[in-house]
Image (cartoon, grey):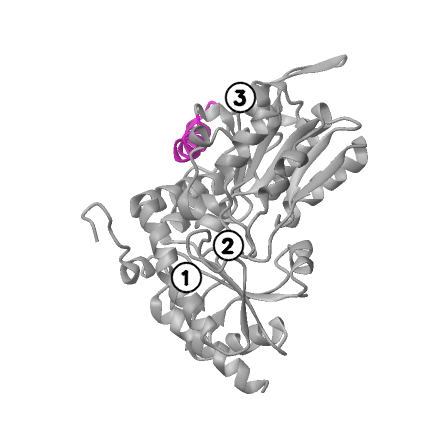
């Protein structure tokens, strides 16, 4: 391994996560559902606890000591997110509850203003419901058309018809950087370039990519990017929307009241500056501070090391599962175009039954359609079992997963 590449000391990392000492049915917990949510290190737990114990106060509204401390920490968290994404300014970061709220904010604010009857929105067949349903709702409301980039049999986007999909008043292309159900890493750089060439804006669903290999929004030149904190070691209920400042300036606020105002009169209201005009009411202050702590934890590990570790587990997981008769991998068969997510089916056994057997072995995986019903329908399956990896997972947990799948086959033989 080159000197510039450092491997994660996973055994040391695991000591930072109290929950990983838990046993399930008398067996050590192997938590392999990181695509759904991740566990929290002591550094994050302490950051949130410290807020509520030491300086719990509302932000931007008080001039007393604790209020000023809370405001400083909250805005420092925004600056941390901006740095992590390489945004031009912290003013391009809006705190939200997560990816779903961020996408809905763009749909209901930018979309309602700039998408009209006869306009076109382009998505892909592999999108999470959170990056599909809001656009369906907007298209129905505005009389717009929603088109989809197809997915091929290997779980990759088929771009052969992209030129025709981008014809005729396309206002937005929206795409997951990494697919949550099958781990496909999409060619977002090319998609952004081609969408911009026809004057369309681009939203990136970074729910899976930001936690695992980060995102440089300036290098990508995306217009919007959404992500969730809980998928990258932070608490639930906190995330962010990145948007180019000119877009935020042009968008109307979605919620009214609280910090989003500049001046209120009986005859009308003027809005606060960005990003505050999108943060009405009391925000999730403590968990924003927790998000900053999670980012700092990941930065200390190094995002390149995080990404390499994902693949050090994914490769043997794919190879081991493929060696089991009747197991079918759902998604890309190669390692170049996927992240640390492995979804699979077993002939004659429902995904829920597989998950139940694995649970009795202390192994936590996801079973179902993973909020991608159209994608599962495309593959002709109702559900799949998904294992997903992160910084605290060990190679022996992959071995346990493979052994557990073999046991599931024996149980239901």
309 within the magenta span: no
Residue 245, numbered circle: 3
List the residue tagged with mark 1: 314
Residue 125's place in the image compared with 28, above or below, is above
Q: Nearer the viewer, residue 128 or 31?
A: 128
Nearest to N terminus: mark 1 or mark 3 = 3
Q: Nearer the viewer, residue 175 or 66?
A: 175
Q: Nearer the viewer, residue 330 or 62?
A: 330
Nearest to N terminus: mark 3 or mark 2 = 2
Between the residue at mark 1 and the residue at mark 3, the CA separation in whole angstroms equals 37 Å
Identify the image quadrant of residue 22.
bottom left
List the residue tagged with mark 2: 183
Is 125 positioned to the left or the right of 363 in the image?
A: right
Furthest toward the front, the residue is 160
SS under mark 2? loop
Identified at 40% across, 34% down, the residue is 80
Identify the image quadrant of residue 334.
bottom left
Identified at 55% across, 21% down, the residue is 274
Identified at 35% across, 71% down, the residue is 396
- Segment colored magenta: 63-87
Residue 330's place in the image compared with 90, above or below, is below
Q: Is the Cβ of the residue at disc 1 closer than 8 Å to that at disc 3?
A: no
3 or 2: mark nearer the eye: 2
Identified at 39% across, 42% down, the residue is 295
């Amino acid at each position: 391994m080159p000197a510039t590449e450092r491997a994660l000391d996973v055994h040391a990392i695991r000591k930072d996560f109290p929950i990983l000492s838990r046993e399930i049915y008398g067996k050590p917990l192997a938590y392999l559902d990181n695509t759904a949510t991740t566990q929290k290190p002591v550094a994050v737990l302490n950051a949130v606890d410290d807020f509520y114990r030491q300086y719990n106060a509302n932000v931007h509204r008080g001039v007393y000591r604790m209020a000023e401390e809370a405001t400083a920490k909250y805005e420092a968290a925004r600056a941390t997110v901006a740095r992590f994404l390489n945004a031009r300014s912290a003013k391009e970061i809006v705190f939200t509850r997560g990816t779903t709220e961020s996408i809905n904010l763009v749909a209901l604010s930018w979309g309602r203003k700039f998408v009209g009857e006869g306009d076109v929105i382009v998505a892909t067949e592999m999108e999470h419901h959170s990056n599909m349903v809001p656009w369906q709702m907007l298209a129905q409301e505005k009389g717009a058309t929603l088109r989809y980039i197809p997915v091929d049999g290997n779980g990759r986007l088929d771009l052969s018809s992209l030129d025709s999909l981008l014809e005729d008043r396309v206002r937005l292309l929206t795409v997951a950087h990494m697919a949550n159900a099958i781990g496909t890493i999409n060619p977002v750089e090319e998609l952004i370039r081609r969408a911009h060439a026809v004057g369309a804006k681009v939203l990136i669903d970074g729910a899976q990519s930001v936690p695992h290999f980060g995102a440089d929004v300036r290098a990508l030149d995306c217009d919007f990017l959404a992500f969730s904190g809980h998928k990258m070691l932070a608490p639930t209920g906190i995330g962010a929307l990145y948007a180019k400042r000119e877009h935020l300036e042009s968008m109307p606020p979605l919620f009214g009241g609280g910090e989003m105002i500049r001046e209120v009169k009986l005859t009308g209201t003027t809005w606060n500056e960005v990003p505050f005009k999108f943060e009405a009411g009391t925000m999730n202050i403590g968990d924003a501070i927790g998000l900053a702590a999670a980012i700092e934890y990941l930065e200390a590990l190094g995002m390149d090391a995080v990404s390499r570790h994902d693949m050090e587990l994914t490769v043997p997981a794919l190879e081991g599962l493929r060696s089991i008769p009747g197991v079918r991998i759902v998604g890309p068969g190669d390692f170049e175009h996927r992240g640390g997510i492995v979804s699979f089916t077993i002939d004659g056994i429902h995904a829920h039954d597989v998950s139940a057997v694995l649970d009795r072995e202390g192994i936590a995986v996801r079973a179902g359609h993973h909020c991608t019903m159209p994608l599962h329908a495309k593959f002709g399956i109702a559900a799949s079992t998904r294992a997903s990896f992160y910084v605290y997972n060990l190679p022996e947990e992959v071995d346990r997963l493979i052994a557990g799948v073999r046991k599931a086959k024996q149980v239901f033989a």
